C-alpha cells in the first residue's frame, strides 16, 4: 500500500516492489502521510481487513430507543403577515423561550430549531406528551396555535442530530395534527399504558413515504373526561 502523495517515499517505489512479488497487489490510497496510523488510518485498516478476510466489516450505526417530538406553529406565514416583521419576531422569540423552558422542565433534548418549530427527543413518551401539551398551552396563551407530533422508536444518533424512520414518522404525524393538538402513534399509546394519559382515536392513516397503515391518536387535555 502507498498513499498517492506520500512525502517520505515515492509511491512508485511501492508499485515497483509489488511488481517483483508474485501474487502481490498494489493498492494506492489518497493522502500525503507515510505512516499508516497517520491521516485516514481507517482506510488503511479496511484494506488490511479485506486482504486478510475477503471483506470489510460494516460499522454498526449508533442507534437508541427514543421518543421523537416535532412542534410547528399553525398558520405562521399568515400571522407574520398580519403582525408585521417586528411584532412577529418578538412573538416568535417569546414562543421559542417558552418551548425551551418546557423542554428543560420535562427533560427533553432540543435537537434543532426548524424555522418556527422544533425537533426534540425524550427518554420517555409520557414526558414527551406532557411537554407537548404544555408547549401548546403556553403558545395559546400568547395567541399562537401549535401542533405536535410524537412517535417512539429507534433513532440513529448523528453527532448532534438524529435520523431514521422514527424521525420521519414523528414528522408526518405532526403534519397531520390539528391546531393545539398533540397527536401520537399507537406505539406511543401502548408505551404509556398506566400513566393516566387518555387518548382520542383519530383513525388510521397512510403516512407519506412510510410503509403500512398507522393508527393515530390525540392526547386528551389534562383533566378532561
Image (cartoon, rainbow, N blue to C red):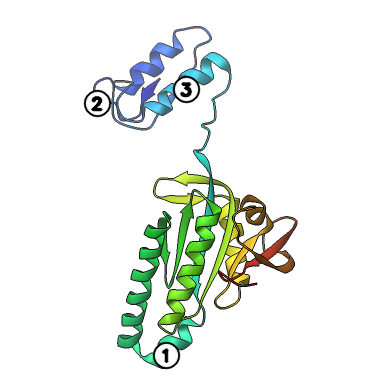
Q: Specify the label residue 161 is tagged with.
A: none
Estimate the x, y position of residue 58 in percent, counting from the top left. Answer: 54, 30
Q: Residue at x 48, y 50 (%)?
A: 162
Quadrant for the N terminus, please: top left
Nearer-the-camera pick, 171 or 24: 171
Nearer-the-camera pick, 52 or 196: 196
Q: How many marks?
A: 3
Residue positioned most to the bottom = 82
Q: Is residue 76 left or right of residue 216?
A: left
Residue on which the image places disc 1: 81
Residue 28 vertical position relative to residue 117 in the rendered view, above or below? above
Q: Is residue 93 left or right of residue 134?
A: left
Label 1 and label 3: CA atoms lie apart by 58 Å
Q: Is residue 199 left or right of residue 52?
A: right
Q: Quadrant of residue 200?
A: bottom right
Q: Nearer the viewer, mark 2 or mark 3?
A: 3
* Helix, strand or loop at mark 2: loop
Residue on which the image places disc 2: 7
Q: Which mark sits nearer the N-terminus, 2 or 3? A: 2
Q: Which mark sits nearer the N-terminus, 1 or 2? A: 2
Q: Nearer the viewer, mark 1 or mark 2?
A: 1
Residue on which the image places disc 3: 47
* Helix, strand or loop at mark 3: helix
Q: Residue at x 56, y 49 (%)?
A: 164
Nearer-the-camera pick, 128 or 115: 128
Quadrant for the C terminus, please: bottom right
Crowd band around label 2 with a 10 angstrom C-alpha radius: few (<14), some (14–19), many (20+): few
Crowd band around label 1 with a 10 angstrom C-alpha radius: few (<14), some (14–19), many (20+): few
Label 1 and label 2: CA atoms lie apart by 60 Å
Amino acid at each position: 500500500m502507498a498513499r498517492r502523495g506520500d512525502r517520505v517515499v515515492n509511491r512508485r517505489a511501492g508499485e515497483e516492489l509489488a511488481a517483483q512479488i508474485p501474487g502481490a497487489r498494489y493498492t494506492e490510497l489518497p493522502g500525503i502521510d507515510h505512516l499508516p496510523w497517520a491521516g485516514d488510518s481507517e482506510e488503511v485498516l479496511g484494506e488490511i481487513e479485506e486482504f486478510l478476510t475477503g471483506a470489510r466489516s460494516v460499522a454498526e450505526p449508533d442507534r437508541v430507543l427514543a421518543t421523537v417530538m416535532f412542534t410547528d406553529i399553525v398558520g405562521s406565514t399568515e400571522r407574520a403577515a398580519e403582525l408585521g416583521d417586528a411584532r412577529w419576531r418578538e412573538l416568535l422569540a417569546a414562543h421559542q423561550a417558552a418551548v425551551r423552558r418546557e423542554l428543560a422542565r420535562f427533560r427533553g433534548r432540543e435537537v434543532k430549531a426548524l424555522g418556527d418549530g422544533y425537533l426534540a427527543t425524550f427518554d420517555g413518551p409520557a414526558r414527551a406528551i406532557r411537554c407537548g401539551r404544555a408547549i401548546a398551552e403556553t403558545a395559546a396563551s400568547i395567541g399562537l396555535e401549535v401542533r405536535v407530533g410524537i412517535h417512539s422508536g429507534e433513532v440513529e444518533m448523528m453527532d448532534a442530530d438524529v435520523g431514521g424512520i422514527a424521525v420521519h414518522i414523528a414528522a408526518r404525524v405532526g403534519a397531520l395534527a390539528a391546531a393545539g393538538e398533540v397527536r401520537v402513534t399507537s406505539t406511543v399509546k401502548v408505551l404509556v399504558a398506566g400513566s393516566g394519559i387518555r387518548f382520542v382515536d383519530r383513525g388510521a392513516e397512510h403516512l407519506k413515504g412510510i410503509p403500512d397503515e398507522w393508527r393515530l391518536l390525540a392526547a386528551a387535555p389534562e383533566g378532561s373526561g
